[in-house]
Amino acid sequence: MKIYYIANARMQTEMAHGIQIAKMCEAFATLGNEVTLVLPSLGAHTDLFTMYDVEKNFRIHYLPTINLPLRLPWAFTLLVLSFAIAVRVWLLRQKGEAVIYTRGETSLFIEPFLSRRFALVWETHIKPRHPMRYRRVAHRTRALIAVTKHYAQEISSLWDISSAKVLYAPDAVDVDDFLHPEPTAAARKRLGLPLDKKIVFYAGRIDSWKGVDTLLDASELLPETIQVVIIGGTEEQIRGLHLRYPRVRFLGYRPYAELPNNQSAADVLVLTGDPSSATARLYTSPLKLFTYMASGIPIIAADLPSFRDVLSEREAFFFEPNADALAEALLFALMHRKDAAGRASAALQKVQAFSWTERARAISAFVV
């Protein structure tokens, strides 16, 4: 099968979408598909294969776009329109049938340009703010891919389409990347973390809907023998948070390739989410959930439906999303080491089924 993965995305990013796109292209190609990732040309082209530690088994094609600083009026609109035109011209030059795979709002401007020799597959992660704008796209697709069970069930009624066109496919992980991390003591020394304290670890962005403030507030309720560590966040965010939460260690951005070794420094891994956010409750399948599971380290997770899609009490400790409950759950997990180790082992066993290759295999079979 020939697949053109078209993404209006800045791939030189620490954000999860870059990792997910690169990993899915690699996985589709691993299954024998001919894959081309089509991106807007946004300046210097980073070696994405090295950046995301993926095999060079697919092609990357950059299309010319109008790339202005996003702070300028209409800059994003001009980028979208110019990329849409470039995609249309590029597709006209391609021969034969192919699957057009895309995600997010990119589907809106691709769909009008597609001839019938192209089958459209739309991976949608978050319910659009204006769903009716996507009605035509939903009806044009051969398949819609949703990353949570709630969204997969909601799509049929949202756009009045058959549920047979909708596939639930949560995100995934390369489990092999986490098989041989560096020893805990070595990871802590490299990161400048104490050897004599329990390490509570969070890796990811510090956006409000991710609920990291719950962990920050919980840090004030923990004894001095427990160190909260956060990898991620912008320099500006960290400057402000460091003043408010001096007991928390903020390590800033670290490359994705370091993640297995960085997680090795932890005694427990925390998965937070803001319960007031529909995105957190119903529409997210965070990559960290699966990297946490692959680590074999105990997981403390906010009790949200999106996380319950994958995790149960057999694999993780859950907490009501507030600081008191999180602090209590952390202390319980750290005190009950045998219970925590058993759940971490069950999570590691369960995550074997959530590889990028198996995700790509399920989607490929569904599309065909």
Image (cartoon, grey):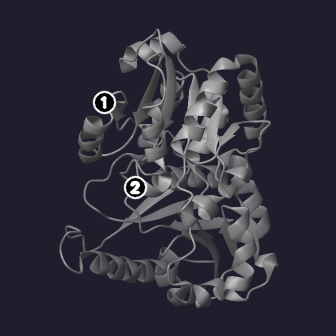
Is 286 or 365 nearer to us in this picture? 286
With 241 as the anchor, is 34 left or right in this view? right
The quadrant of the image that shows the N terminus is: bottom right
Q: Position of residue 240 (x, y in %)?
A: 25, 43
Corner quadrant of residue 350: top right
Q: Amino acid at mark 1?
A: Pro
Q: Is residue 291 above or below residue 23?
A: above
- The answer to whether 223 is drawn above or below residue 103 in the figure is above
Name the residue nearer the viewer: 275 or 345.
Answer: 275
Q: Residue at x 24, y 76 (%)?
A: 75
Q: Residue at x 17, y 74 (%)?
A: 72
Q: Which residue is mark 2?
A: 11
Write the residue at 75% across / 27% down: 345
Query: Counting other residues with Cα less than 10 Å from the Cα at mark 1, is it few (<14), some (14-19), or many (20 or more)?
Result: few
The count of marks equals 2
Give the image location of residue 47, x and y in percent.
37, 45
Left or right of 213? Residue 35 is right
Q: Which mark is residue 336?
A: none
Q: Earlier in the sequence, mark 1 or mark 2?
A: 2
| Above or below for 221 versus 17 | above
In the rendered structure, the answer to whether residue 27 lies left or right of residue 248 reads right
Q: Answer yes or no: do the residues labelled 1 and 2 have beta carbons within 8 Å?
A: no
User: What is the quadrant of residue 69 in the picture?
Assistant: bottom left
Label 2 is placed on what type of residue?
Met
For disc 2, the neighbor class at 10 Å (few under 14, some 14 to 19, many from 20) is many
Res. 278 visible in picture: yes
**Residue drawn at the location 66% of the way across and 56% of the way down:** 306
Q: Position of residue 270 (x, y in %)?
A: 56, 37
Q: Quadrant of the C terminus?
A: bottom right
Q: Which residue is mark 1?
A: 246
Between label 1 and label 2, give the one nearer the viewer.
1
